[in-house]
Image (cartoon, rainbow, N blue to C red):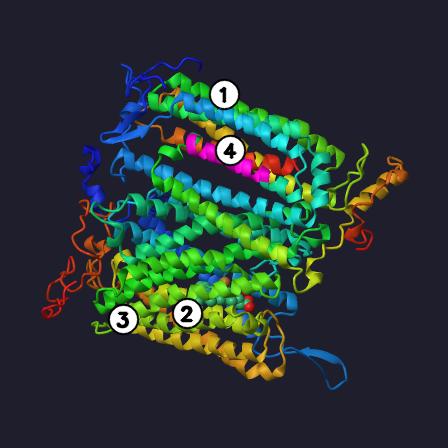
């Protein structure tokens, strides 16, 4: 991953024909470029729907924070550790970089760089989930820091819960859990792409799946970029 | 610009030249072939089948609701001096009635009308009109049908488990504190899943329109049907996710008892209404825009006239799509704050502009056209009449002060039936008749179909015009009981619904008879100019023998001989006097 | 940027695809990490409830734009991708704008509508249980700041 060979267009084409070199396109498309652009347009439309889906959480967040600013401040500082959030942000940002490098590697036909970055990014995703589960979700469930009717946190450490704390936790849980689900899906997709990359499916002439799964992964990162300050850093 | 790779250009073996309906073998093979097909035509037919079933289920629920309202429910003293309830026609309780109208509303909206035109007719016709071999993502297309079926199964499960009585709007707090909340969960999950199906269809069409137009077909060479479906798809993609998150949150609230909408835990129930209508107002345009899309085809083809103001009609679709996102608050005049109400009321009037542009342009197209009184044309005229009433009464409701009086009355019920049924369903019926010969290769019996259309028209107005009157007199919606003064109007409405049902049965009979023994359809029975008429009826598996080329505008009726027709059948108009160019 | 590094590849005859340089990717990553630090730092400075929120959102928007422009290739992509994103963000904007207008103006004519809903009782119940079980010292109750939210005991 450290040294990038300086290759010209098509320099990745090796003597033994890889599957991507033989790729034409599905019969209903007129050419490969149309197919690629069409798939990417489809992906962007899908990403829009994802953003709009998450916009619901953000809308609820703004409205409820508007109603209960004190509870949001107290609950955020007390229930959430910004350091975990910050580490997770960094993890996702780095994995996003990996994915961007992977797309580049696919374009240049650098199979191992492609696969390496994809798998590293998926490891980042796993790390994100592990941190989230081990340091946040499980302890929270044990301490009763869950929203709504199951809330049973009784205070402590000099903190006195506000009656509205469960509302902050509602927003926190639903939005991060939905995001976490997207990370999980992303990891699975990355494995699928990585596996196909190893089989030589992707190269300068065909890298639609790398590009689109990459876009999806960036979106997961993008949403976290907003969730992190809004949930963990309420001053 | 485009090169067709040898392996696909030459793929015209006999197998692919067969009509798409040709059987591939025995029963099992045929069923398997349909269940795994990625052919947009078959998927369109599968959708058509599915939505018609939904329409039937929703229709039966509607009839039971109407029957229950035959007489007001009263508690009276019998001869022995005991209190007895009289006037219960069907349901023994109000809850039963509530479940029936919820079933009707939810099924009609989510299972029938939203997927109806785009997923059934759009799937079949849109790629043909563009001269494409298929939609952009054929497998996603099939997947969306299965998603639709799974979503519908959830809805059926909710019904079989005992039904939901929240109304199709699932307003909080009732929907999160209902005792039978597990059925509400099943229903909201159904809506969530159905939303995906709708999104996939929308995405597919947008990419298809962008990337798969025939060589030489510019944006303004597309038939207006495509423009309408394109605008619809934009709304589907941009609005449906918010419905998704709304019902997802509702489901989570019900399962985990959290409080974003539930006031018992500090949530805000009015926030739910914002979420819901942010989708559901644009959704009414998901319903009507495809209807308008069909209208432009019906009017132009069956009046053999170049459409008046092509670009206005095309752009008004996009205009409607855009405006539909900023008026949702007109459903919440009695719930939200006053400032928001005032703003939303003002914005609501904007919607009328592009809607009116369309109606005026259709009227202008009809002017001096050679109108053929076919069933599609009959439905086009019915649409114009009914939609105008529906749209104009929408303006009454959109003005804040009148809505305070009319909100939650039968006036609203009548309004949205005039637009949804009088608009979308009439256009759907017109469209089905218009493309029926293309889809199944058989003609239908015009005379009986016109009888059906007449019954539907009379039945519809009898059913719903009375409801405008009921509403202005103060009859609230969603009640099983009412004061006796309203009885005659309610009975008139119920009689209308029976006529309507008979009309639909006539149509069903016409379709069955056509399939069983209809005359074989010519490739272009109406003399249409868009590309679906250039291929056989029914189309061959790969749509066209050769990649079609754009030779004329889809509405150039003045100087184009329709493809695949006998020149005597659709003669060109007299040569225009000098100076009348275009 | 090294000259041997390609800026584009030929994807298909007549269609080239842009290749992002390593240097740009690295720079962007560093900026993103720095701004993550910045957003943490700014949250420690008290600028007032709404200003803090706006700054946090602004930084997030900036970071998101970088991700979109470079990692997601919008900078060198066909305009249609940016257009899709634009309309998506616009739609979200409408969603937030009108909902928040309502939330912010409910008190204007009818003050009752703006009052927070009666405080949920879950927290009180949890405390009572903990006190009964001897896990919590009743004296630990030092709640003053939340009294204005109405009677928590009433349900
Ligand atoms: C000229 C355009 C339109 C205007 C100005 C308009 C206005 C309104 C208003 C203000 C209401 C709320 C009434 C109330 O609850 O008090 C309403 C309800 C409704 N409209 Fe429209 N409308 C228009 C077109 C349409 C179309 C095209 C459709 C569907 C195809 C539609 C479907 C509905 C439905 C389903 C409801 C009732 C929702 C419910 O509460 O269950 N409207 N309309
Ligand atoms: Cu509306």
Q: Is residue B25 above or below residue C60?
A: below
Q: Quadrant of the C terminus of chain B?
A: bottom left
A16 left or right of B103 in image: left
Query: In whole angstroms, how far apart are the C-alphas of marks 1 and 4?
Result: 22 Å
Query: In whole angstroms, how far apart are the C-alphas of marks 3 and 4?
Result: 52 Å
Q: Nearer the viewer, mark 3 or mark 1?
A: 3
Query: In whole angstroms, how far apart are the C-alphas of marks 2 and 3?
Result: 21 Å
B228 left or right of B578 in image: right
Taking the magenta stretch, the answer to whether it contains residue B506 is: no
Res B544 seen here = yes
B236 left or right of C60 in image: left
Q: Is residue B340 above or below residue B145?
A: below
Q: Are marks 2 and 3 in contact (CB under 8 Å)?
A: no
* Residue B56 position in % (x across, y down): 45, 63
In the rendered image, residues at marks 1 and 4 fall on the same chain: no
Look at the image and give the residue range highlighted in magenta: C55-70
Residue assigned mark 3:
B364
Q: Give the chain letter at badge 3.
A: B
- Res C63 label: 4
Residue assigned mark 1:
A120
Q: Are marks 1 and 2 in contact (CB under 8 Å)?
A: no
Magenta span main SS: helix
Judged from the image, the secondary structure of the residue bearing numbered disc 3 is helix
Mark 4 CB within 8 Å of ligand 2? no
Q: Quadrant of the N terminus of chain B?
A: top left
């Amino acid at each position: 991953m450290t040294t990038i060979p300086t290759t010209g267009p098509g320099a990745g084409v090796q003597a033994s024909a890889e599957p991507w070199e033989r790729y034409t396109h599905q019969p209903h498309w007129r050419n490969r470029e149309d197919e690629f652009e069409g798939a990417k347009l489809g992906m962007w439309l899908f990403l829009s729907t994802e953003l709009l889906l998450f916009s619901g959480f953000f809308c609820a967040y703004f409205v409820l924070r508007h109603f209960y600013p004190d509870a949001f401040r107290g609950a955020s500082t007390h229930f959430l550790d910004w350091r975990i959030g910050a580490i997770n942000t960094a993890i996702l940002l780095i994995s996003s970089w990996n994915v961007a490098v992977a797309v580049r590697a696919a374009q240049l036909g650098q199979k191992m760089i492609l696969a390496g970055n994809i798998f590293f990014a998926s490891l980042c995703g796993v790390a994100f989930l592990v941190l989230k589960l081990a340091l946040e979700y499980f302890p929270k469930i044990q301490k009763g820091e869950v929203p709504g009717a199951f809330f049973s946190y009784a205070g402590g450490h000099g903190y006195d819960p506000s009656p509205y704390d469960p509302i902050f936790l509602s927003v926190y849980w639903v939005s991060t859990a939905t995001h976490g689900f997207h990370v999980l899906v992303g990891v699975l997709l990355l494995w699928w792409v990585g596996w196909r990359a190893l089989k030589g499916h992707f190269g300068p002439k065909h890298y639609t799946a790398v590009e689109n799964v990459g876009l999806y992964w960036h979106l997961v990162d993008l949403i976290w970029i907003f969730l992190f300050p809004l949930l963990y850093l309420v001053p | 610009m485009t090169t067709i790779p040898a392996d696909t250009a030459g793929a015209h073996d006999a197998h692919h030249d067969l009509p798409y309906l040709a059987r591939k073998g025995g029963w099992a093979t045929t069923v398997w072939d349909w269940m795994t097909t990625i052919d947009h035509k078959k998927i369109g037919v599968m959708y058509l089948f599915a939505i018609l079933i939904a329409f039937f289920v929703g229709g039966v629920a509607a009839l039971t609701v109407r029957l229950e309202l035959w007489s007001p429910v009263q508690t009276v003293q019998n001869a022995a001096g005991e209190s007895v309830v009289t006037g219960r026609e069907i349901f023994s309780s109000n809850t039963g009635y509530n479940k029936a109208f919820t079933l009707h509303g939810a099924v009609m909206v989510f299972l029938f009308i939203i997927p109806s035109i785009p997923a059934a007719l759009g799937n079949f016709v849109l790629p043909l009109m563009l001269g494409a071999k298929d939609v952009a993502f054929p497998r996603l297309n099939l997947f969306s049908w299965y998603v639709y079926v799974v979503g519908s199964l959830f809805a059926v499960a909710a019904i079989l488990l005992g039904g939901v009585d929240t109304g199709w709007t699932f307003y909080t707090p009732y929907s999160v504190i209902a005792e039978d909340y597990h059925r509400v969960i099943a229903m909201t999950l159904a809506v969530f899943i159905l939303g995906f199906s709708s999104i996939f269809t929308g995405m597919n069409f947008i990419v298809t329109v962008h990337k798969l137009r025939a060589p030489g077909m510019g944006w303004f060479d597309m038939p207006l049907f495509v423009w309408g479906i394109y605008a619809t798809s934009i709304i589907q993609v941009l609005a449906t996710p918010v419905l998704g998150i709304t019902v997802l949150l509702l489901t989570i609230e019900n399962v985990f008892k959290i409080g974003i909408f539930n006031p018992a835990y500090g949530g805000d129930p009015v926030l739910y209404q914002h979420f819901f209508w942010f989708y559901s107002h644009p959704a009414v345009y998901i319903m009507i825009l495809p209807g308008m899309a069909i209208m432009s085809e019906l009017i132009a083809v069956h009046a053999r006239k170049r459409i008046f103001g092509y670009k206005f009609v095309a752009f008004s679709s996009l205009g409607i799509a855009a405006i539909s996102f900023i008026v949702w608050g007109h459903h919440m005049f009695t719930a939200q704050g006053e400032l928001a109400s005032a703003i939303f009321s003002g914005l609501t009037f904007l919607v009328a502009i592009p809607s009116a542009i369309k109606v005026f342009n259709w009227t202008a197209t009809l002017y001096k056209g050679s109108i053929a009184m076919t069933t599609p044309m009959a439905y086009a005229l019915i649409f114009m009449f009914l939609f105008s009433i529906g749209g104009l009464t929408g303006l009454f409701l959109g003005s804040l002060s009148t809505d305070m009086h009319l909100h939650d009355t039968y006036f609203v019920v009548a309004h949205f039936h005039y637009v949804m049924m009088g608009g979308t369903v009439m256009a759907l019926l017109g469209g089905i008749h218009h493309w029926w010969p293309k889809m199944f290769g058989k003609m239908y019996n015009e005379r009986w179909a016109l009888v059906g259309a007449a019954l539907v028209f009379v039945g519809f107005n009898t059913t719903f015009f009375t409801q405008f009157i009921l509403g202005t007199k103060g009859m609230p919606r969603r009640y099983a009981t009412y004061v006796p003064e309203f009885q005659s109007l309610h009975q008139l409405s119920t009689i209308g619904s029976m006529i309507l049902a008979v009309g639909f049965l006539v149509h069903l009979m016409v379709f069955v008879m056509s399939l069983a023994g209809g005359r074989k359809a010519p490739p272009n029975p109406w003399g249409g100019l868009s590309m679906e008429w250039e291929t056989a009826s029914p189309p061959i598996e790969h749509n066209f023998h050769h990649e079609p080329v754009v030779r004329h505008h889809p509405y150039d009726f003045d100087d184009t001989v329709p493809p695949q027709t006998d020149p005597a059948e659709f003669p060109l108009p007299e040569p225009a006097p000098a100076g009348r160019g275009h | 940027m090294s000259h041997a590094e390609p800026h584009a590849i030929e994807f298909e005859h007549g269609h080239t695809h842009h290749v992002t340089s390593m240097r740009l990717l690295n720079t962007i990553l560093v900026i993103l990490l720095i701004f993550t630090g910045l957003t943490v730092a700014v949250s420690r400075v008290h600028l007032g409830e709404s200003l803090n929120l706006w700054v946090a959102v602004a930084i997030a928007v900036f970071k998101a734009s970088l991700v979109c422009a470079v990692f997601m290739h919008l900078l060198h992509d066909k305009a249609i991708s940016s257009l899709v994103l634009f309309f998506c963000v616009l739609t979200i904007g409408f969603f937030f704008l009108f909902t928040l207008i309502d939330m912010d103006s409910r008190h204007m004519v009818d003050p009752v509508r703006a009052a927070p809903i009666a405080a949920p009782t879950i927290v009180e119940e949890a405390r009572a249980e903990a006190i009964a079980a001897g896990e919590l010292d009743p004296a630990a109750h030092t709640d003053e700041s939340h009294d204005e939210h109405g009677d928590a005991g009433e349900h």
